[in-house]
Image (cartoon, rainbow, N blue to C red):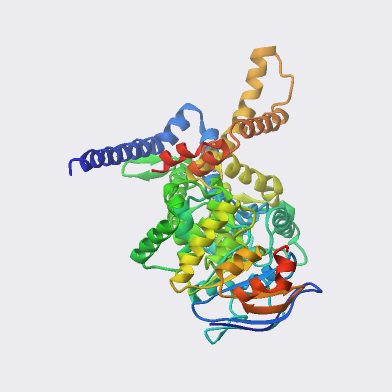
């Protein structure tokens, strides 16, 4: 009995530490838009709103790439499906104005269906071959969106669809400041809270999935597909499920994007975007949820810092702007990626397993850590 | 228990297994020996449905296996240890064993079976939380066999368990396989190491370019001059 007590106390302390940490985290997340809005201005708040969308995308792609180990280079297509479904069902394009609570789930479902559509013919492919097929798929979707303005105009082609209804619930629209119990919540703040709520929901779902039978089956397939089959895992269905689940997260984010932006065009869904989301997953720490979230935030914010910072820094250093900040932005960004991959090859915040593997720790250390 | 009739396996146009017929009785350990490329592994892969069967029938406890998808074999009580071990490298030993029990839901039974695997292979218990990828080849083979046992199979298919292992390790592994078989497990052992395989098994089949050329009790195969010359290096 006596021997058990310290352990129990430790457990209680850990638990209360976790509670305190989540409360602090909650306060910071709740106050964040006001801090950023008053300190840095609304353009930065917009960027933070986008960071939330990218977190959702990165978590969705993490299911496919991080958990199931299926390299997907066309993931942005599912984002496009969600965004265009919202745009078509809530804009003057067809004069339709369906409610948000109907379109977003429909977008998730349609994106999920497209996920299965991509997964079904590629079940036997892995690695490089799968990457090429998914890359093709992403481009096909984009090119379709670009050209579906003739003979019947559906997507309005390269001009895109504008005048999309902002996200709204009942009579409350998020495009205007919302008065609530004497408080006025500005539009960008309201979007922030909505996106944060949905991102947290997706985080919750992903954590539950990771620790489920399905999650373990995904990892088993990633590790060794033949052994997974030998364990009685229906690899076909489980892989399709990974594609479908991952795609549906992308569909949700896409719908939110369309409502937030008010405008969609095929331009927003090019290969570079797919690669960006993949970078978030890989750079953050493939398969590790906190890492992927960190990757999403970093890769949304970092290019913007370079964009806004490159001009003033040059002025201060040289007295004039030598290089166009726009051009410099991607250069610095690429450099940052290389540095991270060189010094933290497992990602910024890898899972314990991956960290062990990359460090090649001695077996005794690993034993202690596992105990 | 297992009745294979006229089994054919082909890779594209190349016939790897040309209509072989053999059977395994309940509780028996049968060895399938032969040189490289004789079609042993193809046979085993076809039985475990990792390869398509292009002809013939495989009946297991009266059921036709060739129409079942691979993942259902585990529920039928057939476990396979793939060639080249095939453990999940970035999972710990415990997690690997847990995956072996993927189709089971009886938590107590799973825990008991895991302890049983640990008594068979004490080495694995010592390293329960170590990543499987960091184990030695022999330990990985132990883990692969342990994982297969975790689904409580009635028939165990072993593909070249001695491949690439030190003689001492091979001996240990074969002792355990023998012990498992002595407790009533039916085992099909595919091996290149003919001497070892025939020493532990009751009956043997000799395979040569996709056909079974010889079959007998293992002890008599061991004494057979043809086998001695071709496979035992005498």
Nearest the viewer among A212 and B41 is B41
Q: Quadrant of the C terminus of chain A?
A: top left
Which quadrant holds residue A89? bottom right
Q: Is residue A287 above or below residue A305?
A: below
Q: Quadrant of the N terminus of chain A?
A: top left
Asked if residue B79 lies left or right of residue A181, the reply is: right
Asked if residue B186 lies left or right of residue B104, the reply is: right
Q: Is residue A362 above or below residue B13?
A: above
Q: At 74% from the left edge and 68% from the top edge, which residue is drawn?
A: B229
Residue A366: image x %, image y %? 46, 40
Asked if residue A227 lies left or right of residue A333, the reply is: left
How many numbered discs sit on the rendered protein? 0
Which quadrant holds residue B206? bottom right
Q: Residue furthest right?
A: B13
Q: Is residue B135 visible?
A: yes
Q: Is residue B46 visible?
A: no
Residue A287: image x %, image y %? 53, 48
């Amino acid at each position: 009995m006596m021997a058990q007590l310290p352990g129990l106390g430790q457990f209680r302390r850990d638990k209360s530490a976790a509670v305190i940490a989540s409360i602090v985290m909650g306060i910071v997340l709740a106050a964040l838009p006001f801090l950023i809005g008053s300190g840095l201005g609304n353009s930065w708040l917009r960027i933070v709103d986008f960071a939330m969308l990218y977190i959702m995308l990165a978590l969705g792609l993490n299911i496919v790439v991080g958990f199931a180990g299926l390299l997907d280079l066309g993931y942005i297509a599912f984002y496009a499906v969600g965004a265009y479904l919202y745009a078509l069902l809530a804009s003057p394009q067809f004069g339709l104005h369906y409610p948000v609570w109907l379109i977003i789930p429909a977008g998730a479902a349609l994106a999920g269906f497209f996920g299965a559509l991509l997964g079904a013919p590629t079940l036997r492919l892995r690695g490089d071959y799968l990457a090429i097929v998914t890359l093709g798929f992403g481009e096909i979707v984009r090119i379709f969106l670009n050209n579906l303005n003739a003979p019947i105009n559906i997507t309005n082609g390269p001009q895109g669809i504008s005048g999309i209804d902002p996200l709204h619930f009942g009579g409350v629209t998020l495009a205007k400041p919302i008065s609530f119990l004497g408080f006025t919540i500005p539009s960008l703040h309201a979007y922030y809270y909505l996106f944060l709520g949905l991102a947290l929901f997706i985080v919750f779902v992903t954590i539950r999935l990771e620790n489920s039978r399905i999650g373990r089956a995904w990892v088993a397939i990633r590790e060794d597909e033949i052994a997974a089959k030998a364990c009685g895992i229906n690899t076909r269905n489980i892989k399709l499920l990974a594609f479908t689940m991952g795609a549906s997260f992308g569909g949700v984010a896409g719908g939110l994007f369309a409502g937030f932006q008010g405008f969609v065009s095929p331009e927003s869904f090019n290969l570079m975007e797919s690669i960006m989301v993949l970078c978030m997953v890989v750079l953050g720490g493939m398969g590790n949820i906190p890492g992927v979230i960190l990757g999403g935030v970093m890769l949304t914010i970092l290019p913007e810092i370079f964009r806004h910072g490159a001009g003033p820094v040059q002025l201060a250093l040289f007295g004039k702007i030598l290089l166009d900040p726009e051009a410099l932005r991607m250069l610095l960004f690429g450099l940052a990626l290389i540095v991270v991959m060189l010094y933290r090859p497992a990602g910024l915040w890898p899972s314990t397993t991956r960290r062990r593997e990359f460090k090649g720790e001695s077996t005794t250390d690993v034993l202690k850590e596992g105990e | 228990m297992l009745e294979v009739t006229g089994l054919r396996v082909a890779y594209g146009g190349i016939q790897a297994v040309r209509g072989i017929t053999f059977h395994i009785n309940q509780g028996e350990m049968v060895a399938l020996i032969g040189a490289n490329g004789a079609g042993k592994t193809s046979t085993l892969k076809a039985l475990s449905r990792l390869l398509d069967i292009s002809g013939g029938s495989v009946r297991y406890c009266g059921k036709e296996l060739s129409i079942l998808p691979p993942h259902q074999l585990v529920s039928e009580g057939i476990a396979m240890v793939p060639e080249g071990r095939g453990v999940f490298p970035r999972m710990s030993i415990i997690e690997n064993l847990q995956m072996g029990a993927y189709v089971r839901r009886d938590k107590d039974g799973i825990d008991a079976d895991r302890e049983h695997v640990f008594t068979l292979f004490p080495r694995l218990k010592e390293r329960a939380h170590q990543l499987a990828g960091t184990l030695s080849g022999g330990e990985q083979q132990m883990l692969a066999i342990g994982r297969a046992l975790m689904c409580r199979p009635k028939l165990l298919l072993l593909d070249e368990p001695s491949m690439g292992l030190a003689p001492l390790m091979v001996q240990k592994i074969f002792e355990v396989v023998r012990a498992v078989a002595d407790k009533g497990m039916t085992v099909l052992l595919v091996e290149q190491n003919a001497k070892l395989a025939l020493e532990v098994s009751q009956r043997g089949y000799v395979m040569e370019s996709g056909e079974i050329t010889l079959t007998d009790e293992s002890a008599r195969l061991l004494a057979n001059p043809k086998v001695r010359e071709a496979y035992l290096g005498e």
